[in-house]
Structure formats: C-alpha cells, structure tokens
Amino acid sequence: MIKVSTERDLRLDLFRGLALWLIFLDHIPSNAVSWITIRNYGFSDATEIFVFISGYTAAFVYGRAMQAHGFVVAAARVLKRAWQIYVAHVFLFAIYLAEIAYVANSFENPLYTEEMGMLDFMKNPDVTIMQALLLKFKPVNMDVLPLYIMLLLWFAPILWLLLRAPSAALIVSAGFYALMWRFDWNLPAYPSGTWVFNPFAWQLLFVFGAWCALGGAQRLARWINSRVTIGLAVAYLVFAFSIAMTWYFPRLGAFVPKFVGEAIYPIDQTNLDVLRILHFLSLALITIWFVPRDWPALKSRAFWPAIVCGQHSLGIFCLGVFLSFAGHFVFTEVSNRVLTHVIVSALGIVIMVAAAALISWYRVIERQGPGPRPPSSKPGYAGGEA
Amino acid sequence: MTGRLPALLAMLLVLAVPANAQISAELPADCRVAKPQIESIFSLPHVAVGIAAKKLNILVLGAGSSLLRGATGAHEAYPTRLQRALAQQLPGVEVNVATDVKPKRTAAEMVQALPAAIAAVKPNLVVWQTGTADAIQAIDPDQFSQALDRGINISRAASADVVFINPQYSPRTESMIALGTYAENMRWVAVQQEVPLFDRFSVMKLWADLGTFDLYSATKKLDMAERVHDCIGRLLADLVIEAAKPSGPHAEGGR
C-alpha cells in the first residue's frame, strides 16, 4: 500500500489561499482589480488551482484516515465533509435570494426590461428553491461548491483504489474524462442546460491532485525537474498569453492564423478543455520550479495571510462568495469608481484573512477546552483541512 | 492599515457622488468615445454590394434589448436610429431596416424564425442581437454556439452579411446573469466565422465608467434608454459603413 506522507506541504495552503483571493476578485462583476487575476492572461483560472489542491489535500487527509481507521471510517468522514459543503451552499443560496429579492423590488429601468426577465423565476419560488436544493438550479458563481460535493461523493472508492494501485485509479479517472467527451456526459441543470462545471470532467484534475499527493509527484520528479519540460511550459504560457491578448485587442486577431483559431476555440470551461489542463500544468510546473518545498520564506509572516486562508478553504471560499455579493452591492449602491474597486477588493481580502485567523484561533481553544471529545477525534493533521 | 481606514472611508463618501448624466443630453457626441471598442477586422462584402447598388436592406434579428417599450418604443429603439444614421451617411442610397424582434428569444429560437424573415426582407445584412436570453435560461453554451453558426450559414447562403451584437452591460443584474460564457462564445464564433462583433457590452461599460450614462439609475422614464439606443444606432452605423469600405476596414488605419 502507498505510504501517505506525514508532513503538510505549505505551498499547497499558500497557493490555495491565493486561488481563493483570485476567485473572490473574479466573482465581483466588472471589478477593475480582477485585471490582475490569471484568467485574463491565459486559458485556465483559479478554479483549476483550487480543484487540484483540494484533491491533493483530500488525499493527504483522508488517505491517512483510511490507512489508520479503514475504508468505512474514512468514507464516513468524506461524506460528512460533503454534507458540510452542501449546507454551506444552501446558506449562500439564501443570501443570494435576499439579494435578488432586493433588486426585484428596488430596480426598474426600461433599458433593462430583458435583463429583469431573469427575475421571472421568483414567480414560482416553490420550484426554484426545490431545484436549488437538488443542486440543479445554481445561481451565478455558485457552481464550485456543487462540483466539490460531487467530487467528494465519489472520492472514497477512488481513494481506496489510489492507495492500492495509483496508476490504475488515474487511468479510471482519465477514462471517465474521455467517455464524458465521447458521450457528452454531464448532470442536468435547471431551468435548462447542464452543470457549468461538469463533474465528469473536473474529477480528472481532482484525482490527479490526489494521485500527486500519494507519491505521484515523486514519480514525476524526473519530468518536473527537466529543463525541456520547463521550456515547453514557458512556451505554452507565452502562446496562451498571446491568444488571450487578441480577446482584448481584436486587431491582434489578424495575426492569428485561421487554423490556430479553428483548433483552439471554443476553449471549454464546462468540460475542462485540454488546453486549460495544459495551461494549469504549465503554471504549476513553473511554480514548483521557483518555489521549492523547503523554501524558508514559506514560514515567514509575509505569506502567512494567504497560507491561513488556504488552510480553512471551505469557510473562506463561502465567505469570499458572500463578500463578492456584498462588493457588487457596494458598487451599485455606493460608488463605482476604480478607487472603490481597489478598496473593496483589498478590504475583502483583509476580512478573509481575519476570518481565517479567527477560525485557526477557535480551533486551538476548542482543542484545549474541557470538552468530552479527545483531540484525536480530529483527522490528524496540523492546522489545515481537506 | 487601521490608521488609514477613516481617510479611506472619507474618500469613499466623496466618490459616492453620482456621475452627472445630464451633461450628455446636450452633447450626444459623447457616446462616440466608444469608437475604438467597435473596430472590426472583418469586412461586409454584401453590404458593399448593396451600397454600390444604391439599395441597402438590413434585417435586425433580436430579443428584448432591441426594443423599447411604450407608445414610441418601436420608433425609438436602435434599429430605427441605425436606419436614420445610415441614410444620413449614405446619401442617395435607399436604406431599409426591417426588424424581427421579440422579447426573451434564445439564439436557437431566432434561427428558426430567420429563413422566413430573410425571405421577406431580402437583406444585405443581418444584424443579430443575442445572448441575454440564452444566459438567463442557462442554455448549453455549445448549443448556443451551434445556433450562432447556423444563423451565419443561413444568412450567407442568402447573400447576406452578419454583424453580431452581444448582450448589454447591465450593472444591477450583473451578479445574477452569467453572461461571461455566452459573450466569450459569441466572440469566438465571430472570430472563426469572420463576422464583425458590435461589442455592446464593452461600449456600454465604457459609458458607465466615464459617466456618459448613469446605467445604475432606477427609473420608469424612457429618456436615458432612448439616448443609449440612439448612440448604439449611430455607432452601429459607423461600424457597418467602415466594414463595408471596398478596401476593407484597414484602409482608414489608426482609429
């Protein structure tokens, strides 16, 4: 059986924390500050980072639980986690309903008759709320948590396989990805269409993250540290950057040969396009190249804010979604100047860090507390969560 | 950080004073700031033929945001203003703008209505406004793209060029309608099929950022909506004329 490493890699927390910040910035519509986020300069975005690292840490945490306490206990913990995420998602949906009800009552403009048609679903809240509870109706920017729930629901069996035959598990995952493309598998959405993040596609990145955590990264070490691979990664990032520039400067489009456009478009986010996977892998390779695992700066105060956010990803992710609603509210009700965007974005990140610090502190006092539960009832890891 | 917080809040309050949209009433040319947003690298050969033949037929295929409600609505929405602007800029050319516009239609629904409308109007150009209804109904983005492709093919088979108009910038509903995927797919189909895209979203966003129009304002009155449509109509006319120049849109250069 694979041996699960015991030391947590702080780089995971750091980059998941950064991904959470980027997701928050991207989720505020028309946020001027979101120009700094990676999705504007290539094919992939922070979602890839979040899903990959979540897979990595899930394998790390539940892999050890599975080895120590067996399949049933680990599977129960995974399902408990999925339930927590479901509850968090429903909580965010309640906030979304409050926001939309406010807009429905307070805003009217003949220019936007068509757009206000989206409020029609409020006419039959019974259906809408039921569909939301079934994870079929998902408001804007609330697609990541349902994806996460689905990824966890099928994680226990895949983890079982990963611990025995990691390569076989990865092949099963890639097989699902291929079948998804072949047969257009996806889950249905309400009122029409399918899930924005297709779980059959995105599981590949999650399982790949888990595979890396369980020894896969060491097996790839020769490739990861090869100059040729790094060169290819850099070349691919430059290519993606050049293509991204044509989205903002249509005139540059004239320099893109027709066959290139035909080959790459559309770059499918729903089904996790191969171009997006490659872009994420290139970014990851270059990051690993520059940031070694034992880099002393990882323990410095400068990186602490991002690391602490990454260590409490579920709470901070939900807070980020709420803050992006709130940020958009400030833009519409108070001011929409660029300076406001900067202040709201910075303040949002400060709140996320403060909340993460609070959760950390709360965990510490909970463990010290006189409660009947011994601290060993927690999954055995320091400071972080799956 | 905490020491600066009161100062930041004070600045926020100063910034909260709403932009004065009244100024633009006297200066309709203000909306031309968006000129760079509508440059296109693709040409409109069938429109050029129509202009040369002194008869230009245009079909506007669209949904709710190609309409303005009320008694004067049909007159004052951008298709009418497009006709006016084109007639002004193309003296001697008979410009007809017909519309096939109904609220809440998805791209696929519009494609179904397209052959009949083309047969009736015989257009040199189909101006196709779409995307919002698809985003609201969360239509499968692939199906949306395929519908766009079909519409282009139908139009071209009938010797008509196509210009896309993407969704409006609607700041109040932005966090509720996921336009992103649909706007991207439209842009990609436009590039692949070499169709000029009238980037209404960016144009309106620029107006909102510069304070040309206060797109946040809650009102029942039509005046701002009419001015927005007027600007869209005139900018659209500029795009059509520019892209139909025989030597292609690069002839003017620089702009």
Image: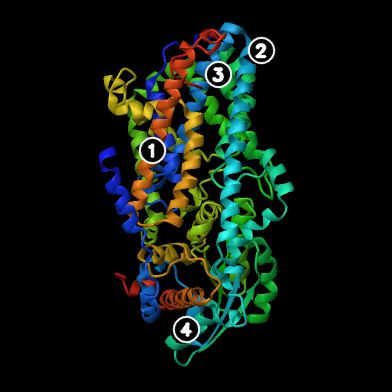
Q: Amino acid at mark 3?
A: Ser
**Numbered tag placed on residue B86 in the rendering:** 4
Q: Which of the colour schemes (rainbow, by chain, secondary structure, one colour) is used?
A: rainbow
Q: CA distance from mark 3 to mark 2?
A: 23 Å
| Disc 3: host chain | A
Name the residue tied to disc 3: A167
| Disc 1: host chain | A
| Disc 4: host chain | B
- Residue drawn at the location 41% of the way across and 25% of the way down: A13
Residue B214, image x, y percentages: 43, 67
Residue A350, image x, y percentages: 36, 36
- Residue drawn at the location 35% of the way across and 29% of the way down: A305
Q: Amino acid at mark 4?
A: Leu
Q: CA distance from mark 3 to mark 1?
A: 39 Å
Give whichever of discs 2 and 1 has the lower sequence position.
2
| CB atoms of marks 3 and 1 within 8 Å | no
Element under disc 4: helix
Instruction: Indicate which label's residue lies in the foreground, 2 or 4.
Output: 2
Which of the image's four quarters has the C terminus of chain B? bottom left
